[in-house]
Amino acid sequence: MDEYFEGFLEDFGPAIEKRHVPPSSVERYRGKLPDQLLAYWQEHGWSGYADGLFWTVNPQEYEPVLDAWIGETPFMEEDAYHLIARSAFGDLYLFGEHHGKKLHIVAPDSRMLPPRKGIQDLNLSIRTFFGSQSRNACDFSDARGTRLFPPALKILGRLAPDEMYGFVPALALGGTATLEHLQKVKAVEHLVFLAQLSELRVMDSPSP
C-alpha cells in the first residue's frame, strides 16, 4: 500500500461491504484505467468507506449512469470516461482513459464542479485522487450548512453497496435538501432518474 491510500484509510477508516473484484473485471479495464487503480481493486475490492459515505464501484455496473449524465455531451468526445467512485448522496467521480482527466458530478442538484486537468502520470493521478478525499467534501449539506450524512446514517441506517441516500421528491422536482426528505434508494436507478430531470450545469468555480 502506498502513502496516498494509507492517508485515505486513516481518514475514511477500514472498508465495509467489500466485494471481491474478479480477474475478468481487472482484465476488462487493463489498459483503460491505471494499473494503480486495478491494484487497489485487487487488494481492497469494491468497497464502502467511512460507514458508507464513499464507495469504490464497478464501472461496468455504472455504465447506464455514465451514459445518462455525459453520454451526449462534448466530454465523451474528449476522452473515454469511466465512473470509478461515488458518494452516499450521488457525487460521481469519473476518470478519463487517455488523459487522466477527472470529472466530479454532484447528481442531486445536477452540477459538475470545474473539470480537473489530467496529469501525465495516470497512476499518480489515481493516488492523488484518493489521497485528496475528505469526509466533508463527500458529505451533503442542508441550507443551514449542516452535514447530512451522520444523522442519515443514524436514522436510515447503513447503506448496502447498491444503495444511496436520495432526496424524495428530487431537488429538481421541488424537493428540499433536508434530512426529513432523505430515503434509501437504489443507486444506479436513482442516478439515471436524476440525470433525466434537468440539464447538467458546469460550474466556473467550486461552489461554497
Image (cartoon, rainbow, N blue to C red):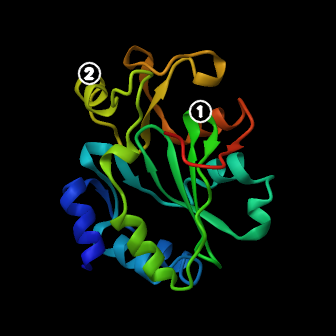
Q: Amino acid at mark 1?
A: Asp
Image coordinates for residue 113, horizontal then vertical, percent: 58, 50
Residue 107 image position (x, y, % from top left): 57, 39
- Residue at image point 38% right, 27% down: 145
- Residue neighbourhood size for the residue with mark 1, other residues' Cα within 10 Å, grouped as few (<14), some (14–19), many (≥20): many
The residue under label 1 is 109
Residue 149 versus residue 41 in the image, above or below: above
Helix, strand or loop at label 1? It is helix
- Left or right of 61 in this view: 98: right
Q: Position of residue 172 (x, y in %)?
A: 65, 24
Q: Residue at x 62, y 15 (%)?
A: 174
Q: Is residue 207 above or below residue 102?
A: above
Question: Which residue has dot 2 on it?
Answer: 155
- Assess whether mark 1 and mark 2 are in contact (beta carbons under 8 angstroms): no
Mark 2 and mark 1 lie on one chain; the one further toward the N terminus is 1
Using the rendered image of the protein, determine whether residue 22 is visible from the camera's viewpoint.
no
Element at badge 2?
A: helix
Q: Amino acid at mark 2?
A: Ile
